[in-house]
Amino acid sequence: MDAASIAGFLLKAVSHEVALATIAIHADWLGKRLGETMFERGRSANLGLRLAVLAIAMMIGGSAHAAAIIVALGASNTYGKGVARNEAYPAQLEALLRAKGHQMRVINAGINGDTTGGMLRRLDRAVPHGTAVVIVQPGGNDRRKGAEGDRAGNLAAIERRLRARGIKVIVAENGMFHRLPHQPDGQHLTPEGYRMVAQALLGQVEAALDGR
């Protein structure tokens, strides 16, 4: 493996937010390969590789307090149907948190038309290891699809499985979306409406994180 490949390996690890764990696990192997590469490629390659590793180390150092992961799990009002990706409430919530100095990453795991049963089935895929908080927006598709009787049991199962993983759960009930600015369809919010949802959730998310 040459210098570029090793640097690429490290950059990939950083981009997936598992750099610290990856480098710790492979420290001996990386050290050996770096040493071999420096010996094989000479001083000029050494300098380039050293600079690449230094840059990556700075990136890792900057994420020593890595961004906490928040997952917004839900249906179309989580996905943000009818608005741009940066206008959906998860993106606006992340911006609000970062503006207050919180290093957060909010993953939009909303799917248009999803039910609580669908959310339960995809829970493990949607919520990665290391997640601190999940915001569950049940939506109204259970009722529309004749599965309203399963709603309470599905939500209880979602909460139980997340809490077993040490993840805090916030439920954004449908009432939170009432009396907010809606698109012409009357069901999905405008960008301003999603901003208001993000603001309403901000305090709950901060409280959940403070209680970690």
Image (spheres, helix red, strand yellow):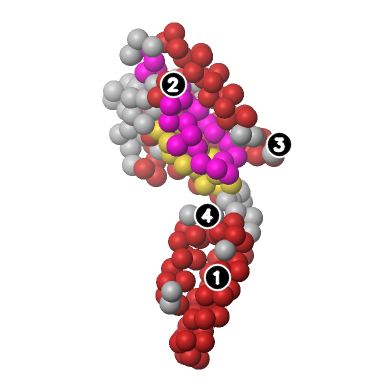
The mark that comes first in sequence, 2 or 3, is 2
The mark that comes first in sequence, 3 or 1, is 1
Residue 117's place in the image compared with 30, above or below, is above
**Residue beneath the point at 59% across and 24% down:** 160
Q: Which mark is nearer the camera, 4 or 3?
A: 4
The mark that comes first in sequence, 2 or 1, is 1
Residue 30: image tag: 1
Residue that label 2 marks = 116
Give the SS element for disc 3: loop
Asked if labels 3 and 4 touch by Cβ distance under 8 angstroms, the answer is no
Residue that label 3 marks = 211
Percent of width and height locating residue 11: 47, 65
Percent of width and height locating residue 59: 55, 66
**Residue beneath the point at 42% across and 20% down:** 117
**Residue beneath the point at 64% across and 55% down:** 65
Give the SS element for disc 4: loop
Q: Which residues, given as a range, are shown in magenta?
A: 119-144
The answer to whether residue 82 of the structure is visible from this angle is yes
CA gap between label 4 and label 1 equals: 18 Å
The amino acid sitting under disc 1 is Leu
Residue that label 4 marks = 17
Q: Which mark is nearer the camera, 3 or 1?
A: 1
Residue 168 sits in which quadrant?
A: top right
Say if the magenta span includes residue 132.
yes
The amino acid sitting under disc 2 is Thr
Residue 8: image tag: none
Q: Residues within 10 Å of mark 4 (few under 14, many from 20)?
A: some
Q: Which mark is nearer the camera, 4 or 1?
A: 1
The amino acid sitting under disc 4 is Glu
